[in-house]
Image: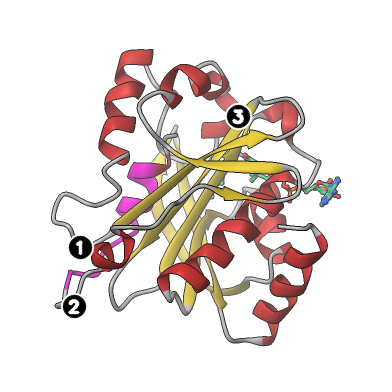
Amino acid sequence: MNLECYARARSRERCAASRTVNEMDANRDCTLSSSRLVLEPIQARHSELLFEQLQDPSLYRYIPTEPPTSPSALRARYERLAKRQSPDGCETWLNWAIRLRATGEYIGAVQATVRPDAPALLAYELGAAYRGAGYAAEACRTVMRELVDGYGVSEIRAYVDTRNERSIRLLERLGFDRTGQIPNADYFKGASSDEYIYSLDAFSKAAQRFDRSRRSVGS
Ligand SMILES: CC(C)(COP(=O)(O)OP(=O)(O)OC[C@H]1O[C@@H](n2cnc3c(N)ncnc32)[C@H](O)[C@@H]1OP(=O)(O)O)[C@@H](O)C(=O)NCCC(=O)NCCS
């Protein structure tokens, strides 16, 4: 996924905690599942399974990155992501490939960046053929639960281009609140990109809604 650079660019806080999140991550079995999906921690082998899916230009309309140039370039990136931490060791980079239980197809990815003393960051992408079925919401709820229960995260944040209506709908459906706006946050693909900041406090009423709905999808 090209989400790595995107979330990393949003991660500006410095590593300050003496106990890094990676100590918590060290022994976790990160395969997650919900009623329709299995979320597999991204490894090098996923480059072959996801490369074709990632050629879809609609995935990159509202983010600065481009499709992977070759399977080997994607493999190299997934090898880095499989280490699950930033080069300075301060952040835990969690990336999951989303697999449909029913057919075994790989349909997209979810990424979370867990940072010491800062909100976790959430990002996601789904192949065009699989949108409109609630899969992204189901995958995100599963990851959000893992962040709260497994990593002690109390706030989750997402940055989204103000033109990205599907992503905005998804965040609001998940219970996120719009907490800020960054005009001219970036410039790419011939246009300026304004961004909304969306936040979810894990202990808020909205989070209780997310918690209820996650049960209803059986995740
Ligand atoms: C953002 C993105 C992941 C959203 O995907 P999505 O499929 O629209 O999101 P959801 O999983 O929440 O699906 C919701 C839709 O499924 C429908 N749906 C159908 N069956 C459903 C079910 N069982 N449960 C829930 N929703 C269901 C909903 O009604 C909704 O339809 P609507 O959007 O027409 O109202 C997708 O558009 C994408 O990958 N975009 C490109 C990458 C990108 O921009 N990433 C974000 C960068 S910030």
The x, y position of residue 23, in whole percent, is: 24, 66
Viewer-proximal residue among 104 and 119: 104
Q: Residue at x 41, y 67 (%)?
A: 120
Amino acid, disc 3: Ser
* Earlier sequence position, callout 1 versus callout 2: 2
Pointer 1 with pointer 2, Cβ within 8 A: yes
Which type of secondary structure does the marked residue at label 3 adopt? helix
Q: Dot 3 corresponds to which residue?
A: 58
Q: Is residue 15 above or below residue 55?
A: below
Q: Is mark 1 within 8 Å of ligand 1?
A: no
* Earlier sequence position, callout 2 versus callout 3: 2
Q: Residue 90, labelled with which disc?
A: 1
Amino acid, disc 2: Ala
Q: Give the quadrant of residue 99.
A: top right
- Numbered disc in front, either 3 or 1: 1
Which residue is most to the bottom?
Answer: 204
Q: Residue 5, labelled with which disc?
A: none
* Earlier sequence position, callout 3 versus callout 1: 3
Q: Is mark 3 within 8 Å of ligand 1?
A: yes
Q: Residue at x 45, y 51 (%)?
A: 30
In reply to whether residue 144 is colored magenta, the answer given is no
Q: Dot 2 corresponds to which residue?
A: 17
Structural crowding at the residue carrying mark 3, measured as other residues with C-alpha within 10 Å and reported as few (<14), some (14–19) or many (≥20): some
Q: Which residues are magenta?
A: 4-15
The x, y position of residue 149, in whole percent, is: 51, 72
- Numbered disc in front, either 2 or 3: 2
Viewer-proximal residue among 177 and 148: 148
Tell me if residue 181 can be seen: no
Tell me if residue 160 can be seen: yes
Q: Residue at x 64, y 30 (%)?
A: 127
